[in-house]
C-alpha cells in the first residue's frame, strides 16, 4: 500500500490530523492497535479550549459539539469552605466547552468514514523504517500477515505507550519527567452535576474535582494513593469521601447514585524532545503527558495537530520550512501548558508527608486569587488556552 502520511494511532490526535489533511486533499492511512469500540469506551478529558473548538469546526466536525456541548464562562477553586470563582469570560473574553473526549472521537470517526479514509484496526508489531531518508515505510502485522505501507511522512499519534517515540534512537532524544505520588479515581454517574460550573477543590483530605458531561451526567475525581485499585472503592465510600472534600454547601445538596464507570489514572508530567526525527513527527501523548488538573492533555494534542497539519501540507508541495519549525514551535506551547498543569497540581493536591508550611502556601495562593484580579486573570488566560 502507498500513502502520503501514515498515521500511527487512531485516538483524537491521529483522527484529527487525518481529517484536516484529507480535507486539504492529502492521502492518509491510520493504523490503530485496538478496536474502535475500545477507543470509544475510554472516558477521558471533558474540557475543550476555544482554540480546540475552532479547530474541530475547521475540520468539519463541529456540528454536534455546537449543538450538544456546553460553553462555560468560569469555574470554582475551593479550599474547605473558601470559594473563589474564576470568571474566564470577564477576565479574558473567552469561554471553554464542556464536551467529552469520547464524543469528539466519535464525531471524528464518523467524519473519517464519510471521507472514506482507510483506518486499520487490530494492527500488531508496528515498525517505522528508513526514517532518515526518502522512501520511509511502515510495517505491521494484521491477522498474522506482515504488511507494508510506503509513505512520505509518518505521524506518531500513538499515545504514551506507543511505538513511535521509542523508535527515535535514545541518544537523539531527551526526556523530562515528574511522577506525582498519587492518582485520580474517576467516577461517571447518571446524576445531576453538583454545580453549574466545575469545582476544583482542595481540602485537608486531598483534592476533588466536580465536573460533568451534561445536565444528567456527572464526572467526579478524587485524589487517591497510587496503591489503590478502583475495586477498593465502593460507590458509598466514594461519595462519602468526595463530599468531605467539596465545600459543605455543595456536599449537602448534591445528588448521588450508582457509578457507571470507575477508573484510576496516575499523574505524570513528561516531555520527550525533539518532536521530529527525519520523516517522523510525534503528536499528542506520544510526546508529552500532563497531570489532568489543568485540563490540558487533549487540548495540547489539538495544538500539536494545528502546527503539524499545515506544515505537512506545505512540505508535500515542496516547502519544508514548516516541518523544520514544527518541533520548536509546538514545544514552546507544550512547556507553558506543562508549567500551568504542574502549578495547578501543586496548588490543589495534598502531598503525603508534607509539612504544615506547604498547606499554608496552598491556602495563601487561593486567598491571593480571591483578592487579586491580576492573579485570577493569569490563571484564566492559561486555563482557556494560550493562543496557538
Ligand atoms: P491517545 O488518546 O492515547 O491515543 C493513542 C492511540 O494510539 C490509542 O488509541 C492507542 O490504542 C493507539 N496505539 C498505541 N500504541 C499503538 C501502536 N503501537 N500501534 C498502533 N496504535 C497504537 N486529559 C484531560 O485533559 N483531562 C482528563 O481528565 C484526562 N483523563 C485521562 C485519563 C487517562 C486514563 C488517560 C490515559 C489520559 C487522560 N487525559 C486527560 C489525557 C487525554 O485523554 C490525552 O491527552 C489524549 O487522549 C491524547 O490523545 P492522543 O490521540 O495523543 O493519545
Ligand atoms: C475533566 C477532567 C479534567 O482533568 C479537568 O481538569 C476538567 C474536567 C473531566 O473529565 O470532565
Image (cartoon, rainbow, N blue to C red):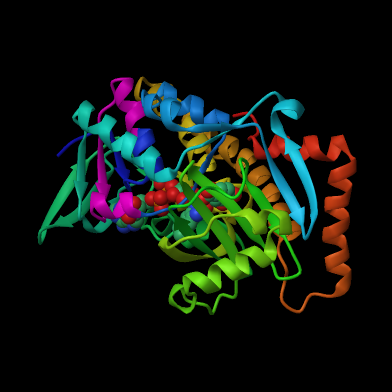
Which quadrant: the N terminus?
Answer: top left
13, 377: nearer the viewer? 377
Q: Position of residue 227 (x, y in %)?
A: 54, 79
Above or below 173: residue 49 = above
In the rendered structure, the answer to whether residue 114 lies left or right of residue 188 reads: left
| Quarter residue 261 falls in | bottom left
Label count reads 0
Above or below 182: residue 278 = above
**At x 46% / y 72%, what residue is drawn?**
230
* Residue 19 colored in magenta in the image: yes
Judge whether residue 321 can be spotted in this image.
Answer: no
| Quarter residue 206 falls in | bottom right
**At x 48% / y 30%, what residue is drawn?**
306
Judge whether residue 144 can be spotted in this image.
Answer: yes
Which quadrant: the C terminus?
Answer: top right
Residue closest to the far front: 253
**At x 88% / y 47%, what residue is drawn?**
368
* Residue 139 colored in magenta in the image: no
In the rendered structure, the answer to whether residue 13 lies left or right of residue 250 reads: left
Q: Position of residue 72 (x, y in %)?
A: 60, 33
250, 265: nearer the viewer? 250
Q: Position of residue 259 (x, y in %)?
A: 43, 62
Q: Position of residue 83 (x, y in %)?
A: 78, 49
For the record, the magenta segment spans 18-41
Amino acid at each position: 500500500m502507498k500513502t502520503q502520511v501514515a498515521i500511527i494511532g487512531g485516538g483524537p490526535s491521529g483522527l484529527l490530523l487525518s481529517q484536516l489533511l484529507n480535507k486539504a486533499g492529502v492521502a492518509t492511512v491510520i493504523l490503530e492497535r485496538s478496536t474502535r469500540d475500545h477507543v470509544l469506551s475510554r472516558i477521558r478529558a471533558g474540557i475543550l479550549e476555544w482554540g480546540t473548538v475552532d479547530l474541530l469546526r475547521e475540520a468539519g466536525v463541529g456540528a454536534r459539539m455546537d449543538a450538544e456541548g456546553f460553553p462555560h464562562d468560569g469555574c470554582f477553586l475551593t479550599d474547605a469552605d473558601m470559594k473563589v470563582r474564576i470568571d474566564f469570560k470577564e477576565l479574558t473574553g473567552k469561554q471553554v466547552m464542556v464536551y467529552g473526549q469520547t464524543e469528539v472521537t466519535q464525531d471524528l470517526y464518523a467524519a473519517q468514514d464519510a471521507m472514506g479514509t482507510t483506518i486499520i484496526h487490530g494492527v500488531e508489531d508496528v515498525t517505522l523504517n528508513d526514517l532518515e531518508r526518502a522512501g520511509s515505510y511502515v510495517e505491521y502485522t494484521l491477522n498474522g500477515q506482515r504488511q507494508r505501507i510506503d509513505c512520505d511522512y509518518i505521524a506518531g499519534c500513538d499515545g504514551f505507550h506507543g511505538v513511535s517515540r521509542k523508535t527515535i534512537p535514545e541518544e537523539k532524544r531527551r526526556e523530562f519527567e515528574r511522577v506525582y505520588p498519587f492518582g485520580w479515581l474517576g467516577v461517571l454517574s447518571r446524576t445531576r452535576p453538583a454545580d453549574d460550573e466545575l469545582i476544583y477543590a482542595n481540602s485537608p483530605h486531598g483534592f476533588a474535582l466536580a465536573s460533568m458531561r451534561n445536565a444528567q451526567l456527572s464526572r467526579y475525581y478524587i485524589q487517591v494513593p497510587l496503591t489503590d485499585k478502583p475495586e477498593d472503592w465502593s460507590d458509598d465510600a466514594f461519595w462519602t469521601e468526595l463530599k468531605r472534600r467539596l465545600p459543605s454547601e455543595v456536599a449537602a445538596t448534591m445528588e448521588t447514585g450508582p457509578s457507571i464507570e470507575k477508573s484510576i489514572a496516575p499523574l505524570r508530567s513528561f516531555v520527550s524532545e525533539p518532536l521530529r526525527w527525519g520523516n517522523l513527527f510525534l503528536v499528542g501523548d506520544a510526546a508529552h503527558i500532563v497531570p489532568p488538573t489543568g485540563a490540558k492533555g487533549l487540548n495540547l494534542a489539538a495544538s500539536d495537530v494545528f502546527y503539524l497539519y499545515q506544515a505537512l501540507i506545505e512540505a508535500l508541495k515542496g516547502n519544508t520550512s514548516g516541518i523544520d519549525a514544527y518541533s520548536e514551535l509546538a514545544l514552546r506551547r507544550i512547556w507553558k501548558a506543562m508549567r500551568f498543569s504542574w502549578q495547578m497540581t501543586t496548588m490543589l493536591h495534598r502531598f503525603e508527608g508534607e509539612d504544615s508550611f506547604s498547606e499554608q502556601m496552598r491556602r495563601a495562593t487561593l486567598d491571593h486569587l480571591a483578592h487579586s484580579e491580576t492573579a485570577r486573570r493569569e490563571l484564566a488566560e492559561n486555563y482557556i488556552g494560550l493562543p496557538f
